[in-house]
Image (cartoon, coloured by chain):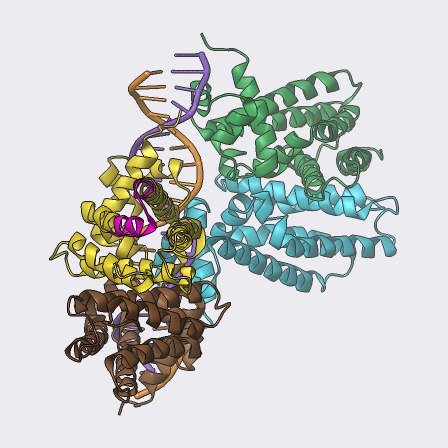
Chain colours: A yellow, B brown, C green, D cyan, E orange, F purple
DNA sequence: TATGAATGAGCCTTCATTCAT
DNA sequence: GATGAATGAAGGCTCATTCAT
């Protein structure tokens, strides 16, 4: 009977190892040692080394989108939802430094991230943002001339770049301190009234 | 006497090869063949395979920043400069598909891109954008409460994400068509008056 | 208490699996699955994977020699016994295609077949043939100048090659059809009178 | 410019190593060391480890068939040719103990020997034997009722088994001493007149 | 300067075997 | 006895880099 906790243990170990050495410079045996198991055991739960990375990303991304969706649903309107989303996006990365390193730096080999197996999870985050913007437009809070698909990518790109700069800059400041400014500028860019 | 054209030929060949196979799946001998030289010759001009990537990026980035700086200098004010910058950013990528693929996808192995040897070139692009925003603020066109460093990263991230999505989406539309919308939303976000 | 049928079930499963995939490309777990048991169970009855092959061969070979000895004992003289032996040798292989594949193809990794643990069983087949030839020589049916040890190997080699060619040739004809010709040529080669 | 002697050096080294350890227990690095080169160099001349074995066999077999064809062509008639062929078959193996070990023992993993890539070379040896028998039949030396294809396999099988027994028996006697007896028995089996 | 044959370190993956349950 | 999850040794192959020519 396969151990239901093993995959999670392996993924958690992989996050730490990838954060430390980078994906390409991490050996499968490193992950195994970090997880406290034999390297062969990894292949009982993952098909290849790549599969670990892909699964890791999918899981984290799916968790994040579900979490974000849940959290913003309580907000009164689209503008508040965007503000909350930005704050959460930064918070989650700030809370888990290893994950931040992996997500912002190691995972950016295009074919494994936005492209390929993980495309679906990224899309669902984009869809979440777009749906909030559309909702805001319906409610008369977002300007009708805003192309929401483009605005979605702008917001994601803006948050993503702030996060990446923060990770690469050795986290010498608090990322969440930038949340209000980011949300404010973006919302002023797309909202009907001054915000 | 070193051939002054060889490094450029090698870089040009590398762009084509990396765009085709990705960095990690490109062999040094592939680049040599594409450049019409022997693989050993590459090591007369580049220290390692990584050095090709780093040099490639530095050169392209330096060229781009110089080009951008020159082009926007003719614009009447900061807002016009931003509009022009966005248009140029998209144009240059749309004009050279191989370069776009390499810059947006292959170069994103953090330690080689924003981090490490290329950090300086990225910084100078950021500095250019920030200087325009500061100029706009001095001229009373940009709101005084805008943190220009953060706004700079937001604009870069927004453009970058649009570009990445376009590359990964197989370039099924014209990237430059998004330029006006991106500039408009960003400027509305940071400018004093409606734009 | 060991199950007395298990070893036989495992060997039967192994014959099918080896015939399908070859010895080196068959996993112990494949044999276990074919036998409907867990792979660990195999090690209750066999020391190693090699042991399965060796035991398989010993058992089949011992069965075959006993069967052959019994069958030819009813024949009136040495020449008739040889004829019957050749017919039986081909029949038994034609009757069990999986066994034929394993014996003629998979088992030919010298050190596991004629050499090593199985040498005794092969020897006893050789001894059976030699004893028939010697008997024929005593009875004045086989020429006195025939070196029976050499003739034994010749006959075995001849039958074995016919069988191997038949297996490798996808069994596109009936192996037993060759029995008369093989026996006739061999006997003409060693007998006193024309046969 | 590839070294034209390297493949031969590698094959010669492989024969020695395979004879010593067997194919499956020989590492590519063993062959490299025996050949006095780096293991990577082997892959400049051979695609895989298997490719070494297949090429080895093809080359040796093609050489042997050409050699045999040339040697027997000087003999006066088919019967003399068969006698010479048997003598040569045993001589060549007796002369090169390492090759004998490899050919008679290591190469007998059906799919690599008679089957697969080497089938053509084996066939051409069979064809040579058959052509001699047919020639003898035309000349009235071989009985017309002899099925030459079957007789060919019998002769090959007989020689092959003698050779294998000799190799496995640690070569405690002279293989060539058996040549006359083998030829005599076979020829008596297929020839028209007593031989 | 240019070549490209040679090098050899490096690592993912398989699978026979073990052993706690 | 039976299980099957866990183990970990083993090795074929790649390819960046070197260097004799």
Q: Residue furthest top?
A: C1
Instruction: Decide if residue A194 is in sight here.
Output: yes
C158, A62: nearer the viewer: A62
Query: Toward which corner of the image does residue B88 lie, by quadrant?
Result: bottom left
The image shows residue B176, relative to residue A13, as above or below, that is: below
In reply to whether residue A108 is colored magenta, the answer given is no
How far across and how far down the image is residue A97, in percent?
Answer: 19, 48
Q: Quadrant of the C terminus of chain C?
A: top right
Query: Which residue range is magenta in the image?
Result: A71-86
Q: Residue at x 21, y 76 (%)?
A: B141
Q: Residue at x 68, y 19 (%)?
A: C67
How far across and how far down the image is residue B56, in percent?
Answer: 30, 76
Instruction: Decide if residue D2 is in sight here.
Output: no
C99, D107: nearer the viewer: C99
Give the main secondary structure, helix, strand or loop, of the magenta stretch.
Answer: helix
F11, B188: nearer the viewer: B188
Q: Residue at x 82, y 54 (%)?
A: D134
How far across and how far down the image is residue C193, in percent?
Answer: 83, 33
């Amino acid at each position: 009977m396969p151990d239901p906790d093993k995959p999670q243990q392996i993924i958690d170990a992989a996050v730490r190892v990838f954060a430390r050495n980078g994906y390409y410079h991490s050996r499968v045996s490193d992950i195994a040692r970090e997880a406290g198991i034999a390297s062969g055991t990894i292949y009982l739960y993952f098909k290849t080394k790549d599969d670990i990375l892909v699964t890791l990303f999918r899981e984290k991304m799916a968790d994040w989108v579900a979490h974000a969706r849940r959290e913003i649903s309580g907000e009164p309107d689209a503008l508040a939802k965007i503000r909350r989303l930005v704050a959460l996006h930064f918070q989650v990365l700030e809370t888990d430094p290893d994950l931040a390193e992996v997500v912002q730096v190691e995972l950016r080999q295009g074919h494994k991230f936005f492209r390929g197996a993980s495309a679906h999870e990224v899309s669902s985050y984009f869809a979440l943002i777009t749906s909030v913007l559309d909702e805001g437009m319906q409610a008369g809070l977002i300007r009708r001339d805003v192309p929401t698909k483009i605005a979605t990518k702008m917001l994601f790109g803006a948050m993503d770049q702030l996060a990446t700069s923060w990770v690469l800059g050795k986290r010498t400041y608090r990322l969440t301190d930038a949340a209000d400014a980011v949300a404010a500028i973006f919302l002023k860019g797309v909202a009907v009234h001054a915000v």
